[in-house]
Each structure stands twice: as structure tokens, then as C-alpha cells.
Amino acid sequence: MIDPHYQSASYALLITLTLPLAGCILLFFSAFRTTPPGRPPARWPGLFATFLMLASLVFSIGSVALIHRGTLMASAGEWIPGFGPSWSLQLDWLSSWLLLLVEIIGLMVHLFSLGYMSEERSQSRYFAGLLFFVAMMKLLVLSGSYLLLFAGWEGVGLASYLLIAYHFERPRAAQAATKAFIVNRIGDGGLLLGIIALAFTCSSTNYADVALAAAHLPHITITLVCTLLVIGAIGKSAQFPLHVWLPDAMEGPTPVSALIHSATMVCAGVYLLARSSFLLNLAPEVGEGVAVLGAITALFAASVALAENDIKRVLAYSTISQLGFMFVALGLRADRAAMFHVVTHAFFKSLLFLGAGAVIHALHGEQNLKHMGGLRRRLPVTFWTMCIASLTLAGLPGLSAFFSKDLILESSLASGHNILTVLGTITSLFTACYSWRLMSLAFFGESRRHHLTPHQPPLTMHAPLIVLAACCILVGWIFVPIHWEAWPLMLSSTAVALLGLWLAWYFYVAHPERRAAIDRRFAPVTGLLRSRWYIDALYEQHVLNGLVLRTANGAALLDRSLINRTIGGLVKLSRRTSRLFNWTDSRILDGIVRFISTFTRFLSWPSRALQTGFVQTYALLFIVGAIAVLGYYLVR
């Protein structure tokens, strides 16, 4: 007999998955109707999307509550015959965390967008993109197989492209969306190859089937599959060296950054590795590589954030750094610590992004920290909520990230990887510095651009900030008890956080002139950080603009001029092909249609001649026909 709670949870799960997708389809078709000039933009798309998110959250909470920390499986038959995977959804402790996280952050972002995007004329297209992303992210999280996960994986990639390029008329936004799409294809290729390898070696891509079959596979096969899955996670979670797309993705609207590029999509790679922990446990050398890569990424991104002046790019590199912390935990097989940091990071980083959006909205689009200052008294709600988020990011005791980051450092210390512990501690110091540097430049001191007159954000923008600030305080106490046995590490982490906060206050608030002197003395280091370690320049020079292949004597096989000639030739070929297709369409295809029409009209002219529309004519024809039939039988 089917458990009624289990069946109710299955229905709730299907409803919460289909609600945002149905709303996306409706808003997408309504997006073709633009608001006429001179009339205020329609507000109903935002209200409709927010209502759907609220209803979806209710059903998600219901499905999680009904399973009572168990596992829910809902299947609907095979998808691709022979590959074994089915249309299966899986809800367990891992997917429950991410599901509720996507719902809560998504609802806050939708509510914030009601005020932030109130002047945009294409609100249907914007909110349709948000709902499409939420639907695809849920599919990724709730999938019961790697193949269905890949469908959601590509869906969130498409949604990210559409939302980054929301202002497609701006060249930088269009270029950033294209860059994100192309760089992610590298990681997606690795993930796809890994899934294909699992399908052929395990005869299935369902998680449960793969877990059973993987124990009997050769070690070299497991290592190869894990490496391919890690490549996919590196691309989606913006780890070094595939991190370059995330800072440029800040060209999208700020609420998009809060939803996609800080809280949910970039954590998809972390979720993939956590879901694949049974494979990583069979290849410990791959796990160690993941931990080392995460530590390098965390330290590198934190150092760049120290010198960034764009408020959103500071938060972008902060996101890359925190994702590096999560990779360290995953590599050390501390999956629950990694997922706990995913949750805490989602709340404080989405709050920081939404707070930055409130600042940008108040300053009429200004994003440069050097042009801000003195906003503490003019934007009090934004200041205090961002203050809580910044102190959480810094790891101040009592706030949520203090618990989750300490668990990761504790895991690295317990594993015997002292170098990783040292790198994590240095990264924590940098994190505290750049988090309070952002607050100091934006909110303290005097305004450095007197012509900027900030205006207060509406209530729809303040409410999400307050809710997320409360989550930053409470989440750590709800999910993790204080580990008093690790008190030496707790004291050292507290000291590092306070030191970083003090350094930022000293050099950016109390004595900014001393900071200027240090910048001049260490100009090469400052230039290196502001140039982002020249990694973006290397990509542009050697991948986009420079040579890719050279012969032994240095002759270029593939250079910029050859690329330009090739592209020019392709453009000319496409134009000639287009003219050929137009001629074929107008002369041949249309000629055939016209011939058939003319021939049909010629054959039908006798019957058409009889259709006069007069009753007398039809009566006469009837009588003539009756006489003809009667005469025929009489003759016989």
C-alpha cells in the first residue's frame, strides 16, 4: 500500500517544479506585447511571478516536511531507451537544502525586483527569465539521474545567458553573456563526457544504479570519470582557471547577480561533486586535487577583491573565493560542511548583492566605490543590513559564516593538510579586509561625488534586505551547535577576522593617507591585483587575439589575420548562400505554388461558371438536370 504522505509529497514536488515553468511560458508569450511609449510599464508580470514563487515555496516546504528526513523517489519511465535513466526526481537531505535555498532566495529576488526593475519596459521578458532559471535550477537539484541533471544544468546556463544579456542593446552586456556561455561550454563538455562514460560503464546514469556499479569498476575508469565531473564543476562554479566569466557577468541586472551568480547557479558545481561523493571516495587523489584547486582559487580571488573598485565586481570575486572554500571541503570529503557553507553563503552574499543594488539604484546607476561615501546616514536600512552581511562574510563570531567556515578549516586541520589550513587562514584575513573595505568606501566618510543625490528605495526593496539579514544571524544557530572542543581554532578565526576588520577601518576610514602611501610604495603589487593577475589579459591575448599554434621555427599557423580572413570568407559565403536561397524560394518554390494554383483554377472554370449566386439559375439547372436524368432512363 502506498504511503499517503509519500504520495502527497510526490504531488507537491511535481507542482513546485511545474509552477515556475508554466509561469515562464505565459510571461514569455506576453513579452511580445510591449508597453506603448508614454505609458508606465505594466506591473502585473512582477506581481504574477512573485505570487508563483510564493506558492512554489509553500509546496516545496510541504514536500520536504512530508518526507520526514527520508528519501522521496518519483519516476515516470525511461527517457532514452537503452541508457537506463528515467524521468526520476529524488528528494533527500542534499536536494532539500538546495531546493529550499533556491525558493527562498528566488522569492526575495522577485520581491526586490518589483522596485528595482519598476522602470523597465520589458518586465515580462525579465520575470520570464527569472522563472525559467528557477525551474531549471529545481530540475538540476531534484533530478534522480546524471542525464536529467545535465538537462537542468544546460537550462540554467541558457537562463544565465538570457538574464546577463537582458540589456542586450549594451555591447558590454552582450559580450559578457557570450563570454559566460562560451567559457561554460568547456566545463559542460567535461560533464557530458563524464555522463557518457558512466552510461557505458555502468549501463545507467541513475544515481542509485551508478553507486552500485561504480564499486566494481577499475580504478583508472573511476579516476577518469571523476576528473571529467570535476571539469564540469570547475566551469559552472567559476574555479581557477575558468573563473573569468563570473566578474564580467555582473553586467546583468543586480537582482540577477544575487540570484544566479552568488546563491544558486554557481553552487551547481558544488552540488554536483557533493552528489557524486560516492565516486570521489573511490578516487581520493582526485579529491585532493579538488581541495588544492579550491584553496588556490580562494586565495587568488580574495587578493583581487582587495583592489577592485566596482562594487559588484568586489562581490563577484568574493563569490569565487567562497566557492573555493567549498571546493576545499568537498576535496577533504567534508560534504556537509561544504553544503552548510553553501547555505550560509547564499544568504549573506545575496544580501550583499541586493544591498549593492539598493546603493546603485539610490545613486542612479553609480557602481564605482571611489565615487561613493557618506551613505550611512542617507541609506540607514541598506547600511545596517549590509553591515550584518559584511560582518558575516568576515566570519565574526555568532554570525552564520563563522560556523560554516570554521567547520571547513577544522576539516582541513583534522585531515593533516597544514598548507591548506594556512592558505584558508590567509584567505579569511583577506576576506575580512575586503568586506569592510567595501563598507568603508561606500558608507563612511564624506561623499566623493557631491552631485550624486541618493533617494530612498521603496519598501519592496527594503523587506528582502531585512529578511536576509535575519537569516544571516539565525541560520548558523539553527543548523550547527557550537563545537567547544574546537575552541583554539574558533579563537584564532575570531582573531583573524577582527584583525582584517581593523586593517580595513584603519587604512580606509581612520588614516586613508597612509593607505595612499602604501599604494605608492607597493605599486607593482597593487597593479598586479588591479589587473587581476593578468589572467584576463592572457586569455584575451592567447585565446581571443593571439596565436594558438606555432611551428618549430615560429611561423604562425593560426593568427588573428587568418581568423579574420576565415570569418570574412564565412560571412561572404553566408551572404551568397542567402541570396541563392532567396532566389530559389521566389523563383522555384513560389513558381511551383503559382503553377499549381493556376492549373487548378483552369480545371475548375466550368464549375465556377455555374456558381452565379442567383436562385433562378440554380432552379433552372435543377430542372434541366432532372429532365436529363428522366430522358436517360426513357432512352434506355
Image (cartoon, rainbow, N blue to C red):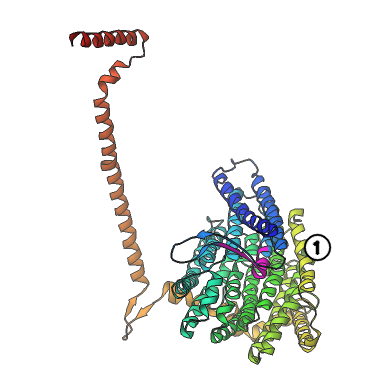
In the image: residue 253, left or right of residue 219: right
Left or right: where 636 falls relative to 51: left
Q: Which residues are magenta?
A: 88-99
Magenta run includes residue 96: yes
Amino acid residing under circle 1: Pro
- SS assignment at label 1: helix
Quarter of the figure with the N terminus = bottom right
What residue is rendered at 66% in x and 45% in y?
44
Quadrant location of residue 384? Answer: bottom right
Q: Is residue 439 left or right of residue 368?
A: right
85 vs 592: above or below: below
Q: Residue at x 61, y 84 (%)?
A: 525
Which residue was labeled with disc 1?
380
Q: Tell me if I can see residue 370 in this picture.
A: no
Q: Nearer the viewer, residue 586 or 15?
A: 15
**x, y (%) of residue 522?**
63, 86
